[in-house]
Amino acid sequence: GAVVSQHPSWVICKSGTSVKIECRSLDFQATTMFWYRQFPKQSLMLMATSNEGSKATYEQGVEKDKFLINHASLTLSTLTVTSAHPEDSSFYICSAPFGTFEAFFGQGTRLTVV
Amino acid sequence: GQQLNQSPQSMFIQEGEDVSMNCTSSSIFNTWLWYKQDPGEGPVLLIALYKAGELTSNGRLTAQFGITRKDSFLNISASIPSDVGIYFCAGQSGSGNTGKLIFGQGTTLQVKP
């Protein structure tokens, strides 16, 4: 299948700082990518849709000023958690659609805010 | 909004046993996908279904897209210890591959050697 690479795989940051997470489609182009958040022992919750060349679309309840999304090219989307707080600690995962009906996920990023 | 109900929530089985899990929805999906997630990693696609009534196999895994487009099941035959993990169903509605998925709650599978 297609490969989606996410970096970093884990990050620890101080409260009040910002953290950037990258999501790359390695062998295909993705005009759309998706960002999910997952709490321990829970399912994936869609946060936003990243659109190449235009603004991201956020799901209800997700603060767009806190979770900045930039889709600068057909193979790269970034999620920046601004002014991070301990409650932002979570597992963040990106995905990209591929082909007729498939979607592939990155490895995920474990964010810990101390 | 759309929701997927996945069951069972967890399973603890003996190695060699068969496993079955399913997802149901109150609304129609055009695509059903089944993923496996290991701890600390992203979901890995196991099987994709896009035709109502379709039955698809991938090794010891078999999945079916319900004829009503509102349900799907995943079977794992002759389970082995490496089958341990969380299994998620995911549905996609609308035309084309939007990539926007709705996930079930997950089924945690534990296999006793």
Image: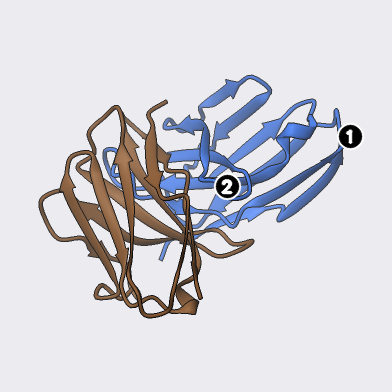
Chain colours: A brown, B blue
| Quarter of the image where the N terminus of chain B is located | bottom left
Q: What is the distance, in whole Å, between disc 1 and disc 2 at their CAs?
A: 23 Å
Q: Which residue is mark 1?
A: B113
Residue at the (73%, 33%) spot, across then down: B82
Q: On the picture, is A29 further left or further right than A17?
A: left
Residue A20: quadrant of the picture:
bottom left
Q: Position of residue B94 (x, y in %)?
A: 30, 47
Q: Amino acid at mark 2?
A: Phe
Find residue B84 and report its horizontal and vertical position in percent: 73, 40
Chain bearing mark 1: B
Count neighbours of disc 2 (C-alpha within 10 A) and say few if under 14, some if 14 to 19, many if 20 or more. Answer: many
Q: Amino acid at mark 1?
A: Pro
Label 1 secondary element: loop
Of B53 and B41, which appears nearest the observer?
B41
Which disc number belongs to residue A71?
Answer: none
Tally of marks: 2
Q: Determine the residue located farthest toward the top in the rendered image.
A: B59
Residue at position x 49%, y 47% from top? B90
Q: Residue at x 58, y 50 (%)?
A: B40
> In the figure, residue B13 lies in which quadrant?
top right
Q: Nearer the viewer, residue A33 or A77?
A: A77
Q: Position of residue A33 (x, y in %)?
A: 29, 48
Task: Name the residue located 30 percent from the left edge and 41 percent from the top edge.
Answer: A24
Q: Chain letter for mark 2, please.
A: B
> Upstream in the sequence, badge 1 or badge 2?
2
Instruction: Give the vertical position of A40 relative to B113 (above or below).
Output: below
Q: Is residue B93 left or right of residue A37?
A: left
